[in-house]
Amino acid sequence: MLIDDERLETALKRLAKSDALVAELHMKAERAEFKAKATKDAIFLRSEGNVAERNALAGIHEDYAKAMDDYFTALQAHDTLKNERSREVIIIECWRSMNSTRNKGLIT
């Protein structure tokens, strides 16, 4: 399969258009992780019992589970876009390699 100039242009545009979005999704994932940890800590502080019991209660609390779900959702969105961008970089690298080979007269 040859990668034409139109596909190269599409890859470049997708990368350019998603710069800010990938940063935003990364920030949302980081924020969600921070909130999940803060939620667990707050539950731990409100719980009774020894440290191990309080930690266990915090770890299975529904508020913490919800916060972790939010974190995993944010992480998935970030990683999906990151993977899509990686694919576009591969397309560009393949185009460059094919173009180099063509310029050397090894393919037509």
Image (spheres, helix red, strand yellow):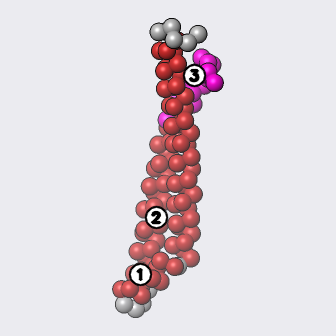
Q: What amino acid type should be assigned to the residue bearing mark 2? A: Lys
Q: Position of residue 34 (x, y in %)?
A: 43, 62
The residue that disc 1 covers is: 55
Are there few (<14), some (14-19), or many (20+) residues within 10 Å of tag 3? some
Say if the magenta span includes residue 76: no
Marked residue nearer the N-terminal end (1 or 3): 3
Magenta region, main secondary structure: helix
The residue that disc 2 covers is: 35
Which residue is located at x 52 percent, y 48 percent?
79
Which residue is located at x 51 percent, y 31 percent?
90
CB contact under 8 Å: marks 2 and 1 = no
For the question of whether residue 13 can be seen, the reply is no
Q: Position of residue 14 (x, y in %)?
A: 57, 30
| Quarter of the image where the C terminus is located | top right
Marked residue nearer the N-terminal end (3 or 2): 3
Q: Position of residue 98 (x, y in %)?
A: 52, 19
